[in-house]
Image: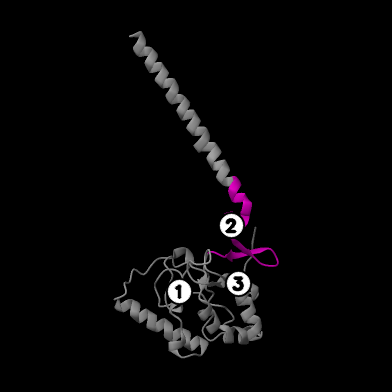
């Protein structure tokens, strides 16, 4: 009996020691290490926030925004891909409500939406429907992607130059400055960060969110 009690006590002490040790490592040391590493680039840790010249937080470089203007009003914005929850062909809803359409490649609904988007964008940019790139009429997997192809950005240059009263060369230089290359040099395709370009054009939100 004494040996059994002694063995039980020894196992209990070992188990308690393991519990305390893992609590210190996983409950304190590991979270502290992750937090400390995140401080190396605090802008990423805080959501890659975009800040204008006055210090206002205007969005995130990781979340797409597609500002809309009233019908018939001048449109000075660089536009993103289809963003937000489905509900209209352009799905220009709140990005926080993003949801996939769940329409497959054989879906008549998806095909109709794509054709409607192609016609809408062609009319907005003053080009033939065939000139509209594929990414302009389709959403990303998340529905939140802030990037568009350089081809879609180039399609918008004449309108951006006209409505922002800048030369096409200036618009192209802003787009080039906010174009990211392939990840690690070989993954994916180059992408233009839409919120960053609109910020560079001086288009921030109506209200200021301070840091």
Mark 3, Cα crowd under 10 Å, few <14 / some 14-19 / many 20+, is: some
Q: Is residue 66 magenta?
A: no
Name the residue: 41% across, 16% down: 9
Q: Quadrant of the N terminus?
A: top left
Q: Residue furthest right?
A: 54
Q: Earlier in the sequence, mark 3 or mark 2?
A: 2
Q: Is residue 25 above or below residue 153?
A: above
Per the rendered image, the range of residues in magenta is 36-62
Label 3: state its secondary structure. loop
Name the residue beneath numbered marker 2. 44
Q: Is residue 45 magenta?
A: yes
Whole-angstrom CA distance, mark 1 to mark 2, is 25 Å
Between residue 12 and residue 164, name the one nearer to us: 12
Q: Nearer the viewer, mark 1 or mark 2?
A: 2
Which numbered marker is on residue 178?
Answer: 3
Q: Is residue 42 above or below residue 24?
A: below
Which numbered marker is on residue 82?
Answer: 1
Label 1: state its secondary structure. loop
Query: Residue 74, can we see it?
Result: no
Q: Is residue 178 above or below residue 162?
A: above
Q: Is residue 118 above or below residue 144?
A: below
Q: Quadrant of residue 108?
A: bottom left
Name the residue: 32% across, 77% down: 109
Between residue 140 and residue 85, name the one nearer to us: 140
Query: Residue 52, can we see it?
Result: yes
Label 2: state its secondary structure. helix
Task: Estimate the x, y position of residue 201 in percent, counting from the top left.
Answer: 64, 76
Q: Quadrant of residue 112?
A: bottom left
Q: Residue furthest top?
A: 2
Task: Estimate the x, y position of residue 97 in percent, counting from the top left.
Answer: 44, 64
């Amino acid at each position: 009996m004494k040996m059994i009690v002694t063995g039980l006590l020894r196992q209990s002490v070992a188990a308690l020691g393991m519990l305390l040790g893992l609590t210190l490592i996983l409950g304190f040391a590991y979270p502290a290490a992750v937090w400390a590493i995140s401080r190396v680039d605090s802008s990423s840790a805080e959501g890659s926030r975009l800040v204008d010249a006055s210090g206002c937080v205007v969005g995130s470089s990781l979340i797409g925004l597609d500002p809309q203007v009233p019908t018939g009003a001048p449109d000075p914005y660089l536009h993103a891909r289809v963003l937000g929850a489905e509900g209209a062909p352009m799905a220009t809803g709140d990005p926080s409500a993003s949801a996939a359409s769940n329409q497959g490649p054989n879906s008549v609904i998806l095909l109709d939406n794509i054709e409607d988007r192609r016609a809408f964008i062609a009319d907005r940019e003053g080009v033939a429907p065939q000139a509209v790139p594929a990414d302009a009429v389709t959403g990303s997997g998340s529905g939140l992607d802030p990037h568009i192809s350089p081809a879609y950005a180039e399609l918008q240059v004449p309108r951006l130059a006209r409505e922002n009263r800048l030369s096409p060369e200036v618009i192209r230089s802003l787009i080039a400055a906010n174009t990211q290359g392939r990840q690690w040099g070989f993954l994916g395709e180059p992408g233009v960060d839409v919120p960053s370009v609109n910020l560079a054009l001086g288009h921030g939100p109506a209200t200021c969110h301070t840091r």
